[in-house]
Amino acid sequence: MILIYTHKVTPRVRYVFKHIFTRILQIQTKFTGKVEDFVAYNGPKFSYTNVALGKEFFVKSNELLFQQGVKDFEIDIKKWGDVPCFFETEEQSEIPFDIFAASFYLISRYEEYLPRTKDSHERFSATESIAFKYGFLEKPVVDIWAYKFLEILKLKFPTYEHSTRKYQYISTIDVDNAFAYKYKSFVRTIGGFFKDIIHLKIVTVWDRFAVLFNIKKDPFNTFKSIIELKKIYEVRTIFFFLIGDYTTFDTNVSASKSKFRLLIKDMVDYARVGLHPSYYTMHNNLLLKKEKERLENIINMPIRRSRQHYLRFSLPETYQNLIDLEIEEDYSMGYVSHAGFRASTCSPFYFYDLDFEIQTPLKIFPFALVDTTLNDYMKLTPKQSLGKIRDLRNEVKAVNGVFITVFHNESLSNYQRWKGWSRVYSSMLKIVRN
């Protein structure tokens, strides 16, 4: 155990020290605000305050962790070795940056509470983030800082022993459209035929006809393949089902269709299942509750996991709504337009509510990439995509973090815009499990 002294033990201090010491570095800590107890302690000790008390490990503290509310900080990015960092400290400090304040700024998503330009879906834009602006979006710098800090800490306390966490991988599958053509309503089916005919999509007209009359398998029905690959590579897999009512942005099969309900129940037998709240749940708690109860009625068990459709959430409102509905895990923390680490960490963390200045029970699982990001936004070929996946996996593995990917059942179909992608998912599993 390491004893930590700080002049004021605030909720922010407890929160970020717990994340870095306990969750990332696997080091147990204890806080004290009494100088005499700290000075008398003979074991490893660390002070986080304005002035060092003696010869302990000392880090000069930034004001951020002792404040309340949100203000617009001027972020001055510099280099700590080969990694960007900010909140520079004085020479007396054992490390040149206050990584605790900087880590809090990033994982609390402090910048998302500030006035920023939103995209067309009211989302915080990747390009507005300091991680994008200063070129470290694809690096889990919070974890990198923690391990750099650990190296220096070991020099101060060479006999101190602690355990090391292990690299993990989680595969998540978003089911926006369980079927391309099957089990859609009569109106949608006829409308689809006419739309294809008007746009002279003769091949699509034939595919639609062949699937509806059981001549061909529905191309998006790739669930059996996903489950087989889960078993082969022994990967933790979570399916997030979109079951909201039909809108322009929510186009899945109706949750009233028995075949769709049977599919969801079937997946529960092989993997974890979570909710994919529809487009308009971002600000609508009643709609979110309705969809959660709908999925719970299908699988006959409580829903504990969620990922927002279109990654459409607003802080802190959407997360507060999830907490009110007793959702325990959220997997929305990432960008659809860019690969990388939105919160600059590859370690699951608890949402800190800056409105109420408390650590909440909602655990955030940040992902590193989405298949649509690689294909639609970055315009990468399947081969180039595997290279990007390998690079991101290496970043996570270097700090023994949790590598989380987002794929869709559609991207395994090798159909239309996913032509050539049929083996990307299985090839990725070889890479991430190697």
Image (tube, helix red, strand yellow):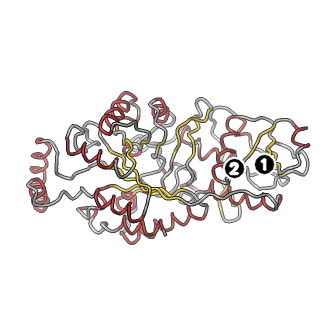
Q: Residues within 10 Å of mark 2 (few under 14, many from 20)?
A: some
**Label 1: which residue?**
2
Residue at screen point 71% across, 49% down: 87
- Is 249 placed left or right of 187 in the picture? right
Q: Secondary structure at mark 1?
A: strand
Q: Position of residue 233 (x, y in %)?
A: 42, 65
- Residue 65: image quadrant is top right
How many numbered tags mark residues here?
A: 2
The numbered disc on residue 21 is 2
Residue at screen point 87% across, 46% down: 52
Residue 27 versus residue 203: which sits nearer the camera? 27
- Most distant residue in the bottom direction: 383
Q: Are marks 1 and 2 in contact (CB under 8 Å)?
A: yes
Residue 181 versus residue 116: which sits nearer the camera? 181
Give the residue type that dot 1 points to: Ile
Q: Secondary structure at mark 2?
A: helix
Relative to 316, is 422 above or below?
Answer: below
Relative to 5, is 171 above or below?
Answer: below
